[in-house]
């Protein structure tokens, strides 16, 4: 891993929050405008993020031992009692990829096998993939044109469609366009 990627240092995030309150405080510092979250009955609430570099590449994780049938996917996880969707997304990205991110926009709300997941777009602002937690066995930086090769679980099909519909993107500005 290079020490700098797209002009931003790749270094450990030593001051990551350790409590739900800490993650909520971090999320509240840069809130994202989002629609209401209408979770269907019987599905767990979950949140995650699609982390994109300014050069258009995306960070994916490989769940340990192919958990839930995934070879690769985007970081996500169940919302703990009392936690916000945005705080959950920030925490899950850090725990699964080692990356510190800033959420930039709402991307999609999708029904998964057992959860209804809110996905945000995000950009890396710190962290190091070597600090991924036990839930992941690898972290990948994947060009947009190769996403379909990596996202092979059928649960990621609609998320991939949403990403590809964005066109060329600028995660740094938090806007997406040609």
Image: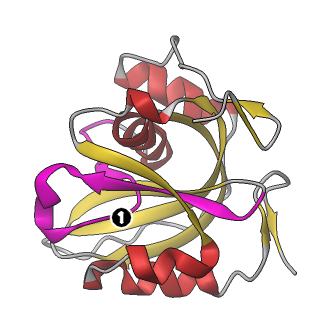
| Residue assigned mark 1 | 73
Residue for point 65% across, 34% down: 2
- Taking the image as shown, residue 86 lies to the left or right of residue 106, namely left
Q: Residues within 10 Å of mark 1 (few under 14, many from 20)?
A: many
Residue 11's quadrant in the figure?
A: top right
Q: Is residue 109 above or below residue 21?
A: below
Q: Is residue 6 above or below residue 20?
A: below
- SS under mark 1: loop
In the rendered picture of this protein, how many numbered marks are placed on residues? 1
Residue 4's quadrant in the figure?
A: top right
In magenta stretch: residue 62: yes
Of residues 7 and 13, the one drawn nearer to the viewer in this rendering: 7
Residue for point 41% across, 36% down: 91
The C terminus lies in which quarter of the figure? bottom right
- Taking the image as shown, residue 27 lies to the left or right of residue 137, namely right
In this picture the colour scheme is secondary structure
The image position of residue 160, as x and y in percent, is 48, 81
The N terminus lies in which quarter of the figure? top right
In magenta stretch: residue 19: no
The image position of residue 49, as x and y in percent, is 49, 56
Q: Is residue 159 above or below residue 58?
A: below
The image position of residue 18, as x and y in percent, is 37, 16
Residue stretch rendered in magenta on the structure: 55-82
Of residues 8 and 74, the one drawn nearer to the viewer in this rendering: 8
Residue for point 57% across, 27% down: 26
Q: Residue furthest front?
A: 2
- Taking the image as shown, residue 176 lies to the left or right of residue 14, namely right
Residue for point 12% across, 53% down: 65
Q: Is residue 109 above or below residue 170?
A: below
């Amino acid at each position: 891993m290079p020490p700098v990627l797209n002009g931003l240092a790749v270094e450990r995030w030593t001051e990551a929050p350790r409590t739900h309150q800490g993650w909520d405080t971090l999320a509240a510092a840069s809130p994202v405008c989002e629609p209401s979250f209408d979770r269907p009955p019987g599905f767990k609430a979950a949140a995650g993020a699609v982390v994109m570099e300014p050069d258009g590449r995306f960070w994916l994780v490989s769940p340990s031992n192919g958990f839930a049938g995934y070879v690769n996917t985007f970081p996500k996880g169940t919302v703990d009692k009392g936690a916000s969707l945005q705080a959950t997304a920030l925490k899950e990205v850090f725990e699964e990829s080692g990356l510190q991110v800033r959420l930039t926009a709402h991307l999609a709300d999708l029904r998964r096998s057992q959860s209804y997941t809110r996905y945000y777009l995000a950009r890396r602002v710190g962290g190091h993939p070597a600090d991924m937690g036990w839930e992941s066995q690898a972290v990948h930086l994947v060009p947009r044109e190769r996403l379909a090769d990596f996202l092979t679980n059928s649960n990621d099909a609609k998320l991939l469609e949403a990403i590809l519909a964005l066109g060329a993107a600028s995660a740094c500005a938090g806007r997406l366009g040609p």
